[in-house]
Image: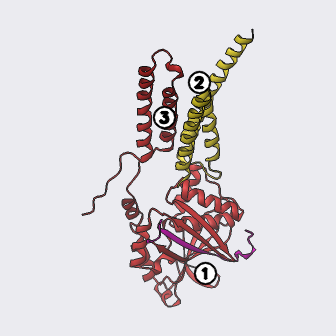
Amino acid sequence: MMVMKIKEYNHYRAGAYLLTGFAPLLILAALLTDPRGYLQSPFLMLSATCFIGGILLFALGGGDSVDTRLASRLSMQGILALGDIILDLGGDGAAIFLPPENDGGRVMQFIPIRSTCRSYQEDGGGFTHHSGSVGTLNPPLAATILDDLKRDNDLILPREYSLLMGAIREVCEDLLSVTGRVEVRRKGDTVTLDLHNYLLLSACTHRREVSPASCTLCPCSICSLIACMIAEGLGCEVSLSQVALDETARPPLMRVHYTLMEGAGIPD
Amino acid sequence: MRKKDIASVVLMVWMLAMSNLMGILYGPDLRFFIAVALMGFFIVAYTMRPIFSRPDYIRNIDRMTVAGAALFGLIIYLRMLELIGYWS
């Protein structure tokens, strides 16, 4: 049985305790080597270095860290079942993230439904028409995370493409700390993001093994969050066109392709 | 390597380099060293600050910056008192 543990301290806190622990030892060394001129001792400066470094590491740490395997499994709870339900109801193609209709609005997710499956609901209730196709309209899975980031972490979504990509990098690398590095490329309407060392990659691999079609049909976790940010920031419709995982790469890589609907008019 | 890791490594390298340099060039002075180290910290804190969001650790860094600024001010004040005493 795989043992999953919640780490009591993260590495920053451990480093902070180590460095601040060294500081008094170095002061002691300064006192023992030169009791009279200890104020001019190099040990005292090393002690100050350890102390300031320790405080910085303490400030950078904070918050409890959870084992990544546990976090990735928790993030997938219910997603697989939801994907299966959408597929069973006739979901087909890729979900489209619709920008908010007004300033206070929210991003919505349109999931197209196959025409043969629309007879489930004879009165047409629950279905919406969008660009000639019929489907369901509901808030994306990452809508709540985006709201939380805006409220708790003062997240701002710029309107310019290049600034928005900077904000996405910041969210993935600094705010959520789920990736080591994010690379963004654009070719016409397609925006490709390389998420290096994505922490929840094992969950994505598992989902793609079970149901590859549901990945683009009902994007989850980081893919959904990035799509929401693009849709809201640029004010254009976005769909997740492809996800490629490479666990053998060093570091592991997740490549996500987004298609901007009518995105050719958006300058780089 | 994440921004946080780079920031902590850069600050440690800066402080160790400065302490060695001060040891080599002239007699070590703890107050001057702390002032130099704090200058390095202020630069690191400024450059690592995200533009579009405010992660939780930035709040801690802000508190540390305020404390560091107070300490820096105290060191400058004491140095000025020393200089005034020397000139008069």
Nearer the observer, disc 3 or disc 1? 3
Q: For the residues carrying marks 1 and 2, which lies nearer the camera in this image?
A: 2
Tell me which chain appears yellow: B
Q: CA distance from mark 3 to mark 1?
A: 63 Å
Helix, strand, or loop for circle 1?
strand
Same subunit, tags 1 and 2: no
Give how far across and how far down residue A232 sits, in percent: 64, 64
**Residue hosting label 1:** A129
Q: Which residues are magenta?
A: A247-268
Circles 1 and 2 in contact, beta carbons < 8 Å: no
Q: Residue A147 location in percent, x, y?
A: 56, 57
Neighbour tally class for label 1: few under 14, some 14-19, many 20 plus, Cα within 10 Å: few
Tell me if residue B12 can be seen: yes
- Mark 3: which amino acid? Cys
Residue with the mark numbered 3: A50
> Which residue is at the front of the view, A113 or A66?
A66
Task: Say which residue label 2 marks.
Answer: B27
